[in-house]
Amino acid sequence: MTDFLTSNAEAHRPQSLIAHFDASQPLAMSAGVMLAPFSIAYQTYGRLNADKSNAILLCHALTGDQHVASVHPVTGKPGWWSALVGPGKPIDTEKYFIICSNVLGGCMGTTGPASLNPATGKPYGLDLPVVTIADMVRAQAMLVERLGIETLFCVAGGSMGGMQALQWAASFPDKVFSVMIIAAAARHSAQNIAFHEVGRQAVMADPDWRGGRYLEEGVRPAKGLAVARMAAHITYLSEEALQRKFGRKLQNRTEKTFSFDADFQVENYLRHQGSTFVDRFDANSYLYVTRACDYFDLAQDYGGSLATAFKNSPTRFCVVSFTSDWLYTTSESRVIVHALNAAAASVSFVEIETDKGHDAFLLEEPDFIATTRGFLAGAARARGLDI
Amino acid sequence: MNAKPATRIDLLLVADMVETGARVLDVGCGDGELLRLLADTRGVDARGMEISQKGVNDCVAKGLSVVQGDADIDLADYPTNGFDYVILSQTLQATRNPKLVLEQMLRIGKRAIVSFPNFGHWRIRWQIAARGRMPMTSNLDHAWYETPNIHFCSIRDFVSLAELVEARIVKAMALDKEGAQMRFDAPWWAWNLLGEQALFLLERKRP
């Protein structure tokens, strides 16, 4: 086995279910090309009911994956949304059939830049067409169809997952009964793009990036990817939370060392975030998924009017924001809500008071838990789900 | 279907004005009591707008479709004829621009339902006349310096406003302190004197 396969085991042989799509079912990509063959790695939880009306698709965020409620095969950590998904939890695996797939462009088994390009027998690297949120959603829709599900009861996601949920509602209004758009935006702002560009430049500035062909050359741009993660991680937290957690506290020392060691706890924390991230994530994948977010501007696809994207939508919407989230602010959520109101869509909008920043959507915030539980229960009643 | 006995009587009267299966927007829906009542007893597609985030969160946790919003500002987002009924229950007097709010309601909804405390009631007139102080009653128990109610009106004031915004009064009733309908036929001046609250069903004169 060549090196680039063993060093990327999850990208090639994921410990997940896989749906393969061959040349007869190509994916029409926003870049204007057809992708075939391609694969989607996914996890499911719970049981699909007889009339297939209880399926929920959960969309993961930038560097998340399909292991939403099960132990991560690389890190050994619990699923990224264990706070919300599981037996008796708001997204109840005893009531609903949960699907979570790795996004197109990802590195956990779905086709991405680390996957083998069948034309060359080598990893795609940058030869994979640039992926968009709409591409991710089209691929998910093909998976859902493969699973024999006509209408999803709900599509939910936070951050980039919320963008996918929004795209689902716009692209497939008749296939989603309800959507939850959490800590997200209808388009990436200049600041959002700017932070992502810093991350990409950090990756590409690493000499081991090798123009994106590092897997073939048996190296990895770990330093660059770690720096990218460090910068991004700051945007996931609030200033208040950073201050509360670390302040100016020193790391295992009583005095400053007058060096560039990680004197401060916050430095040590970020370095740790960066170094653990590179063990589970592919650098090129990071370029692709950040690009997908940057290209996202749903209104642009509908003549500049977001409301047009949701005209006559039968879908029930729930939009959630967090007060201390400065990455995707409440005002971005309000833009979505205003558009949905203008489209006379059924919409709930909740702003959750928290100092935990953007990452609050991954945590056990009582008001957020109650919102999710209530919204899904209301939607289940409206759909006549017997649960 | 029977509503729970705890339901406010005036809300039952509002619910009675709404046709089954209609699309309804409740502006200032509070904790969602009316929305729940409408959804349960009239099978309507009920949506709400509420200014307090706490109220919104409570509503959504109950499975109701509610957004945080300010009637003075956010009604402008809603499309013309988007709803069959737009309801403003005990909120008109707390808006900054009641005329604009009423106009927006009549634009968004085919019909508007408005309830409000009647400032023409004899007890209120008496407090001003006899005591020379801003009135406080059991229903209006805020001191003038901290009241959210900044635009009080009497029943006759409201009838004039309805005329001004070219609304036709389809139904009107005076309510007593508990919110029950005062079942007698009387001219406006009598209702204005004896009604603690009022409830109006309006529609646009021009379609």
Image (cartoon, coloured by chain):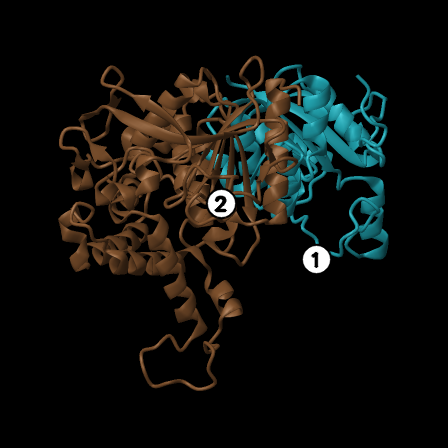
Chain colours: A brown, B cyan
Residue A237 visible, this angle: yes
The image quadrant of residue A275 is bottom left
The chain carrying label 1 is B
Badge 1 density bin: few <14, some 14–19, many ≥20, Cα 10 Å: few
Q: Residue furthest front?
A: A1
In the displayed structure image, the side of residue A375 where residue A327 appears, left or right: left
**Is B116 drawn above or below residue A210 in the view shown?**
above
Q: Amino acid at mark 1?
A: Glu
The image quadrant of residue A371 is top right
Question: Where is residue A147 shown, x and y percent of the image?
Answer: 44, 18
Asked if the residue under mark 2 is in contact with the one under mark 1, i.e. CB atoms within 8 Å, the reply is no
Q: Amino acid at mark 2?
A: Trp
Question: Where is residue B59 shown, x and y percent of the image?
Answer: 65, 37
**Is B16 drawn above or below residue B101 in the view shown?**
above
- In this view, the residue in front, A366 or A120, is A120
Q: Same chain for marks 1 and 2?
A: no
Which type of secondary structure does the marked residue at label 2 adopt? loop
Query: In the rendering, which numbered label is found on residue A80?
Result: 2
| Distance between the alpha carbons at the discs numbered 1 and 2 | 46 Å
Quick one: quadrant of the N terminus of chain B?
A: top right
Which type of secondary structure does the marked residue at label 1 adopt? loop
Residue located 51% across and 63% down the image: A241
In the displayed structure image, the side of residue B150 where residue A216 appears, left or right: left
- In this view, the residue in front, B123 or B94, is B94
**Is A60 drawn above or below residue B42 in the view shown?**
below
In the displayed structure image, the side of residue B4 where residue B113 appears, left or right: left
User: Residue at label 1?
Assistant: B146
Badge 2 density bin: few <14, some 14–19, many ≥20, Cα 10 Å: many
**Is A383 drawn above or below residue B143 in the view shown?**
above
- In this view, the residue in front, A318 or B165, is A318
